[in-house]
Amino acid sequence: MTIYTYDPTTLQLTGVSYPSGLVRTNIYNGSHRLATTIDQPVGATNSYVWNRDGTLFNQTDGRGLTITNFWDGLHRLTGSLYPDGTTTSNSYTLIGGFTYPNSSGSTTIMDTTGTKDRLGNWTYYVWDAVRRKIFETNANDFVTAYGYCPCGSVAFQTNALGTSVQEVTTLSYDYQGNNLTVEYADGYTINNTFDSLRRLTSRTDGWKSNWFNYDNTGLLISVSNLCGIEKETSSDLLDRPVYATDENGVTVTNTYDNLNRLLTRGYPDGGVERLGYSARGLIAYTNQLFFTNFYTYDQSSRKTAETNADGQIIKYGYSAAGDLLTLTDGKSQTTTWNYDQYGRVTNKLDQTSTVILTYAYDANSRLTNRWSAAKGNTTYSYDALANLTRIGYPSSPAVTFAYDPLNRPTNRVDSVGTTVFSYTLGNQLLTEVGPFANDAMTNSYIDRLRTGLSLQQPSGLWTNGFAYDAAERLTNVVSPAGSFTNIYTAGVGGASGYCSGLRQRLLEPNGSAITNNFDPVARLLGTYWRTNSGGLANKHEYLYNLAGQRTNETRIDGTTVAYAYDPIGQLNAYPEGVLTFDTNGNTLTANGTHNTFTYDGENRLTGWVYYQSGPSSPQSGDKEVLLAYDGFGRLRQRLQYVYQGSIGGGGAPPPGQGQSNWALTGGTNYFYDPGTGRPGGWLVIQERSTNGTPTVSYTHGNDLSGSREGAGGIGGLLARSDQYSSGNWTRRNYYMADALGNITYMLSTNQAMVATYRYDPFGRVISQSGSLDSVNSYQFSSKMYDSVLGLSYYGYRWYDANLQRWPNRDPLEEEQGLNLYDLAYNDPVDYVDTLGLQILIPIPGPRPPGVLPWPFPAPLYPPRPYNPAHHHGPSHPPQSLPRPSHLRVCEVSTGSKSDYIEAKKKCIEECIDELPTGTYNGDPFYKCLRDCMERAGFKGVPQF
């Protein structure tokens, strides 16, 4: 119950008592304006000072931040003053002598003509005579223009007006004001249709048409396309989704409490997730295996502690303003964050109260400086529109960026070289040139879908072609390695007529085919690679528990691997090894001092040395690898050296510093698929020697996410091509991955086995064979394995399978969880880490054992620390709603969904005259509905 109290004379609200125990008190000044609000017992206070005319003079928040406001005679905000002396401003004066026909000649208007940020950057606006914005000039002096139709809606928008990259978007409308068409500068057009109630009924572009269907209450009940059904939803009488069916034909069943909070979520395999609440929020989550996480909150509903199913407790502490100050983990180790008066993180302290990170900002709250104990200061510079223009490192070359008038990166200069980008009229990446010779990459598109990719070579081109069906699903990939065809299932668990993104078959250029089978929850049951004669070359078969964890894997030789988990979903395996670290948490040495590591200012691995007898006694044959990255953080060059003899004086300086004792023995430059939007794709499509000769090319299809790069390319490798000569690749071999995206088998063009691998759950190779088993470097998680380093390259970090952990901290810090070193929550048979950022996705189909009932917010990096207390649940990110069965209405009902909907409509009409008057059980309207639905044969329907 929420209780409100009022002043008996003024009837102003003086207090609110919330069910959570929070009490808010409002205090008013002599003019009966709100002067102070106080939240107890958390101690949060906000105060207000008013001008006589009723405008707010200043406000002081719970951190003590006071912002002072200035107003004109029309009560319009003209500026704000901050404690550091910076200001923001608004102008209402016509610019550049602009006047209106038949006006009084005044230069002051009602609309805002300019806004200034705290760094002094102005944005200007021009309005027509009926107060519609017609021009906007940003802080970099580039103009956006707007034109209007007679109905008053925007008919065209011109971006970067008058520049070489000007783009015009055109819109049209019907007489009801519905947006019928949108045509972009590249000709890509979207067409919409609407019904008489102005509901969108179809949307069509050059590839795909979608149809939207509604019930008679206006709720969306299905979305379909030419391929089939994309999703279906059936709601109860309170418009809550009870049955949600996805594109695979998998239905999730939901129940709710009387406050419309989700109580249970059920799946076709019988698994049920359960949630419990108090007045302060979610207090218990029980997964399908009956393991429960518990949560406690303070009076402001901020999570103060959580206990997982293993009994481990995490505690959180806050300031009165709600900033996360401390996090105490299960080992009673406390991490602390400090903030400035603007609520920005300034320091991070570890469990010994040692400052390990500090941050500084400009007046617009953009990060300008990051200091770490191990690497010193890294600086960041921006243009007036907040585009990052420079990153300055303490001990390595800076990275600089340039942008065009549409804020697209056009140039990047980094330690590897210079790269230049160009774009289509649809803002899609057209070309990427540099930083190496003969490396121009070009994309081609049809209606915004990429249909071609080419990479310049010393002779000839490396090309990829892509084809799609009417649902925009990738159907064909063509490269010099051959033509690959995807065939998709129409539904799982006996369902049909759905537009699933699950690949049922992959047809290979050598005549072989990979076939996948799925269970009713869209989990992969088996994947089989057969030759064109029907012979089984390789297979993987899987079993799952109710929580979606893989419990068994059967291989082609009949061996079975059983997986066991602890109550919080971690595999029962533990790493070993003795390591030393720097103050940033990077591994410095392993195996005593035989292996040493060096890092740059971004904590990226830049060097590795193997000393046979330690760094103080270098010997002939010691090895070193140097790594270089581009401005997007991608590995672009690997150089390998060998030590040729003692130089005396104690120790071997690193190569590249004028020392002749290190000899270059090999090197590789890496070329990436440029991606289709902003530059920065992560898929390696070619490797070349340091003299520019192509050595290996790779063909990629869709990865585990169902897109080309959504899972970081894991499970998407199709082919490896080598033996380049005069523009041609004379040897081609093909990949098979298991359900986890691990490369387990390779076939040649004549369908002979050339490589096979087996891994333990954390990626250590336990057996391998074949003529290419050591030549092929893409292995566990479809990531490049460096046999010299003994590490796998994921993108942002290198992974050590022997240690079953990352050698350095997650760059996202605590944003994605408390353990900064574990791989995939220590459950790599159910999750994959896409790029080494602990941004994980569950393997398609299975559900994580301790998922949240809703997604995490987007990452905040840098530098806001992760605040687990903001998330009501365990620190595992959840999977999207899994996909249960076809036409299941409820556990005990029979009939189709249409039967259920018709029964619901009939019962509503029958009971409509009886209105709700009280609680559920005593309410005649709801009792009537329940009884009516039971008579109709739907006894199992959750309470309405």
Image (cartoon, rainbow, N blue to C red):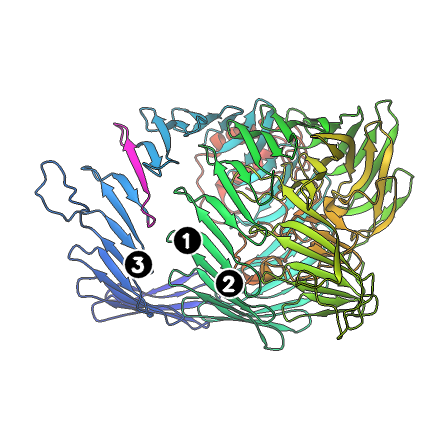
Q: Is residue 776 left or right of residue 848?
A: right
Q: Earlier in the sequence, mark 1 or mark 2?
A: 2
Callout 3 environment at 10 Å: few (<14), some (14 to 19), or many (20+)?
A: some
Query: Residue 81: image x %, image y %?
Result: 28, 65
Comparing labels 1 and 2, the label whose residue is closer to the camera: 1
Which numbered tag is attached to residue 301? Answer: 2
Quick one: 673 or 830, which is closer to the camera? 673
Q: Circle 1 — which element?
A: loop
Q: Circle 2 — which element?
A: loop
Callout 2 environment at 10 Å: few (<14), some (14 to 19), or many (20+)?
A: some
Magenta span includes 141? yes
Quick one: 43 or 239, which is closer to the camera? 43
Q: Are marks 1 and 3 in contact (CB under 8 Å)?
A: no
Q: Amino acid at mark 1?
A: Ala
**Magenta-highlighted stretch: main secondary structure?**
loop
Quick one: 252 or 833, which is closer to the camera? 833
Point out the stretch of residues depicted in magenta: 139-153
Q: Amino acid at mark 2?
A: Ser
What quarter of the picture does the C terminus occupy? top right
Q: Circle 3 — which element?
A: loop
Query: Residue 730: image x %, image y %?
Result: 77, 30
Q: CA distance from mark 1 to mark 2?
A: 34 Å
Magenta span includes 836? no
Mark 1 — residue? Answer: 386
